[in-house]
Image (spheres, coloured by chain):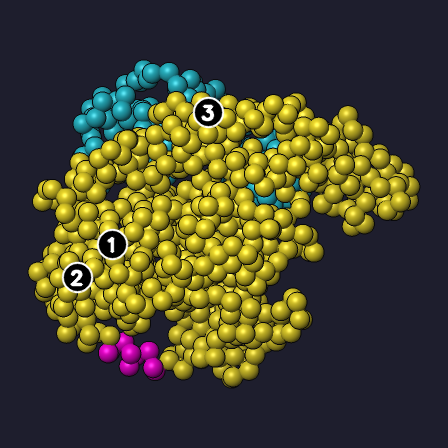
Chain colours: A yellow, B cyan
């Protein structure tokens, strides 16, 4: 794109784009998010390109590859507009038919449409699908209409109008007031009021200051920031530009984890495009405001999601946190005032500026305004990226959006907030999801990971999993976190392997309390949450492990054994052939037997058995 | 600039440098893994501003280029970015992204994120480790496979996920994983047989 020297030129480009876009009779959108790339959306894109050409529809049709649409479980996803026909699990071989029926004509390929698993009815468009209907998609909606590598797409839907509004008609103070009035709180997990943070940073001493975008989404089982940065990077850049103007920064950084190669790539492309268009750099749109952004990659350290550790990492060092007696808004990156916000927080800013603080504050609860993106994963039917107003109940999220348990399994908990959060049982499912309520219940909203767990998940194993994760990720700087987590892991491992005693539970609680109170950084202070929350809500599971030396969910390997049910076994021999450890014996058409001494409990026999004859005892 | 063999402080990865590996194993590796061309490192360094804050970016580039961070490369980086060698080593050994020893021809990455965990990734990890006789991060004797863990790849809907040489495999089971490894082994054998046949001709 040519360099835009003034606001009028940006408006001109937008008008031109509107005319150009109207010329396309149909738009074929293929979800190109990370979740759809694994099951093969890129060959679908290629097939669509070939088919449009072959069927002579290239000129009248626009083919668009976008970021994540959210419904990852149904990928690869193809949507045909106008009308929003939603095709799922599309193979490259299906594309010819879709183009012939829905692009050349106005029909639908019924077999590729979504079928509601509850009612068995075909739901042809996104607006008919319960997964989408139950959501309030303010941020994620743009993902469906924006090619993340085309700044034109973002401009066409009104991108950078909030920046223009700010640069041409608002003082930095009034921007801060607007953000404060909206009630926006940090989406990275801390929940600190964003406007207040900006105000503190603006007021800090010094002439040079920085704004930073935290895209080091280290929580396992969470990919909200990936979805936004990968799918709509310009909305994040526009938020940063507005923040930089309000705070008085000329330089910004996006710190993105290298495990998200697509997000890294799209962020680079977006920055280069914005620079070329004159929306980053010196004298932006001729207003005299200058700001530029650099992308820095994280190198695989969970601790770098913590503000002081992230800044240490940006400086090129090891990511160790420091005490926060002097906050980073006063002394952060290179000891300059630095304002760090999470990807989703930044992406909310342009919407707040454009629609007003009151619009934003109208959604949500008393203390938590707006919408929040969550990644709904684990043992739930509809996994993917969702967005709901703050205060929506866990029940709505898990059952209305998530569709409930898989294959009739009973859901027993939701883990929220990643390794800093906790497990909430079904009894808590009517709680409104907001910063304060979840914290009171012993968990947290965190950055928005939600892992659903059913009866096949063992809560002792979950606690052990998080402790192992945290032990591995503890930077080791402070003693309580380094040793406390290791000690807790030892105790929980004892319980999981049948060596636990009743006294262990009191010891666990004691160590957990010490770690929470005395660790240096927020990640250490919250590290005991997974243990404490499982102890609080699932104490009986610990008890069964300790007293009966039994794992009710059949997960803790030291306490389970695999056995073939002679009644159900038909002697087909599938398990015998499948077992790589030669632990199964039996004659054809006779019930087979597992030799407990040889069995390593890999579960392959259970996966392969068509008669559900292999049981975990 | 000096590219002599440096003596690095002890620590993970310091024991088995690429040069201490048996020749026979090394022969089977990709060329870029056998010896790290230092001019490639220089090129990476030239693309970056010679400032200490570029350290992680530079190391990531080197890791991408050659699959691990060789000792000689660390020396060059230290000189170029005007950092003590110990600081380069400190950073290279702190972050998970960096391997200090050469990795195998094929990298199997098992996602051990929470969503994959509750869907059975521990079974996947145990299976692959048991099958190949490795611990996470280790490489098979023949230099074919390295098994690594990652905390989350952000495609949780597809779990359990494993990545083989950059290609994502969704909804994995231990049996599927075994087959996948076998197919790679067979493909490798075929390549080897062809190569030997080529030599004889």
**Discs 1, 3 touching: Cβ within 8 Å:** no
Residues B176 and A15: in front is A15
Residue that numbered label 3 is attached to: A484
Disc 3/disc 2 C-alpha distance (Å): 46 Å
A6, above or below A247, in the image: below
Q: Residues within 10 Å of mark 3 (few under 14, many from 20)?
A: many
Q: Is residue A58 above or below residue A435?
A: below
x 51%, y 84%: residue: A105
Q: CA distance from mark 1 to mark 3?
A: 36 Å
Residue at which label 1 appears: A195
A263 lies above or below A59: above
Q: Work out how far the residue at label 2 is from the one at label 1, CA to CA, in angstroms.
A: 11 Å
Numbered label attached to residue A174: 2
Q: Main secondary structure of the magenta part?
A: helix
Range shown magenta: A15-23
Instruction: For mark 1, give the secondary structure.
Output: helix
Circle 2 packing at 10 Å, graded few (<14), some (14-19), many (20+), is few
Dot 2 falls on a residue whose secondary structure is helix
Q: Is A582 contained in the magenta span?
A: no
* Observer-nearest of A330 and A344: A330
Choose top left, top right, bottom left or bottom right for residue A371: bottom left
């Amino acid at each position: 794109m040519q360099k835009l020297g003034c606001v009028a030129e940006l408006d001109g480009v937008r008008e031109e784009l509107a005319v150009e876009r109207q010329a396309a009779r149909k738009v074929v959108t293929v979800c190109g998010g990370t979740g759809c790339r694994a099951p093969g959306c890129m060959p679908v894109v290629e097939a669509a390109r070939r088919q449009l050409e072959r069927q002579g529809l290239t000129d009248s049709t626009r083919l668009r590859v976008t970021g994540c649409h959210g419904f990852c479980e149904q990928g690869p996803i193809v949507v045909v507009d106008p009308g929003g026909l939603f095709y799922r699990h599309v193979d490259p071989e299906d594309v010819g038919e879709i183009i012939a029926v829905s692009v050349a004509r106005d029909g639908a390929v019924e077999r590729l449409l979504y079928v509601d698993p509850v009612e068995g009815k075909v739901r042809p468009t996104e607006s008919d699908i319960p997964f989408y209907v139950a959501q309030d998609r303010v941020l994620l909606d743009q993902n469906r209409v924006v090619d993340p590598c085309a700044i034109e797409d973002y401009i066409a839907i009104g991108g950078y109008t909030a920046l223009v509004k700010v640069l041409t008609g608002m003082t930095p103070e009034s921007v801060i007031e607007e953000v404060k009035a909206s009630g926006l709180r940090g989406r990275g997990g801390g929940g600190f009021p964003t406007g207040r943070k900006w105000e503190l940073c603006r007021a800090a001493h010094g002439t040079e200051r920085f704004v930073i975008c935290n895209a080091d989404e280290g929580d396992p089982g969470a990919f909200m920031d990936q979805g936004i940065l990968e799918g709509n990077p310009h909305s994040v850049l526009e938020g940063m530009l507005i923040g930089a103007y309000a705070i008085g920064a000329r330089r910004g950084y996006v710190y993105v984890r290298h495990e998200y190669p697509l997000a890294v790539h799209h962020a680079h492309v977006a920055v280069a495009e914005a620079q070329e268009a004159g929306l980053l750099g010196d004298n932006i749109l001729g207003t005299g405001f200058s700001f530029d952004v650099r992308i820095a990659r994280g190198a695989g350290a969970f601790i770098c999601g913590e503000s002081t550790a992230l800044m240490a990492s940006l400086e090129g060092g090891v990511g160790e946190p420091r005490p926060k007696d002097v906050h980073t808004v006063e002394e952060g990156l290179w000891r300059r005032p630095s304002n760090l916000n999470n990807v989703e927080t930044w992406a909310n800013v342009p919407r707040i500026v454009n629609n007003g603080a009151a619009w934003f504050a109208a959604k949500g609860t008393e203390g938590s305004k707006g919408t929040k993106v969550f990644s709904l994963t684990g043992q739930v039917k509809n996994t993917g990226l969702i967005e709901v107003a703050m205060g929506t109940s866990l029940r709505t999220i898990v059952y209305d959006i998530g569709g409930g348990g898989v294959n009739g399994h009973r859901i027993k908990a939701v883990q929220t907030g990643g390794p800093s959060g906790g497990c909430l049982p079904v009894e808590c499912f009517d709680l409104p999801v907001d910063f304060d309520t979840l914290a009171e219940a012993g968990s947290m909203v965190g950055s928005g990971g939600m892992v659903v767990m059913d009866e096949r998940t063992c809560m002792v194993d979950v606690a052990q999993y998080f402790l192992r994760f945290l032990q591995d990720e503890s930077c080791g700087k402070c003693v309580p976190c380094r040793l406390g987590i290791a000690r807790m892991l030892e105790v929980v491992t004892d319980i999981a392997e049948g060596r636990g005693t009743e006294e262990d539970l009191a010891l666990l609680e004691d160590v957990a309390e010490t770690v929470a109170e005395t660790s240096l950084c927020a990640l250490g202070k919250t590290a005991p949450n997974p243990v404490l929350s499982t102890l609080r809500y699932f104490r009986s599971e610990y008890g069964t492990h300790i007293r009966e030396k039994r794992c009710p969910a059949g997960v803790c390997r030291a306490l389970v054994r695999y056995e073939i049910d002679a009644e159900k076994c038909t002697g087909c021999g599938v398990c015998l052939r499948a077992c790589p450890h030669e632990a199964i014996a039996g004659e054809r058409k006779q019930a087979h037997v597992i030799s407990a001494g040889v069995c390593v409990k890999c579960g392959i026999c259970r996966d392969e058995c068509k008669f559900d004859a292999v049981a975990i005892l | 600039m000096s590219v002599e063999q440096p003596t690095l402080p002890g620590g993970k990865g310091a024991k088995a440098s690429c040069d201490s590996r048996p020749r026979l194993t090394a022969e089977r590796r990709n060329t870029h893994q056998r010896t790290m061309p230092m001019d490639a490192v220089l090129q990476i360094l030239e693309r970056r501003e010679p400032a200490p804050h570029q350290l992680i970016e530079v190391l990531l580039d080197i890791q991408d280029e050659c699959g691990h961070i060789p000792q000689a490369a660390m020396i060059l980086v230290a000189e170029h970015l005007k950092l003590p060698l110990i600081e380069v080593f400190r950073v290279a050994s702190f972050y998970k992204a960096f391997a200090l020893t050469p990795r195998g021809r094929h990298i199997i990455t098992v996602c051990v994120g929470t969503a994959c965990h509750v869907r059975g990734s521990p079974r996947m990890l145990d299976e692959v480790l048991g099958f190949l006789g490795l611990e996470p991060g280790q490489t098979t004797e023949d230099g074919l496979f390295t098994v690594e863990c990652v905390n989350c790849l952000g495609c949780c809907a597809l779990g359990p996920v494993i990545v083989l040489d950059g290609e994502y495999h969704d909804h994995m089971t231990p049996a599927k994983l075994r087959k996948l490894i076998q197919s790679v082994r067979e493909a490798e054998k075929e390549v080897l047989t062809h190569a030997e046949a080529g030599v004889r001709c």
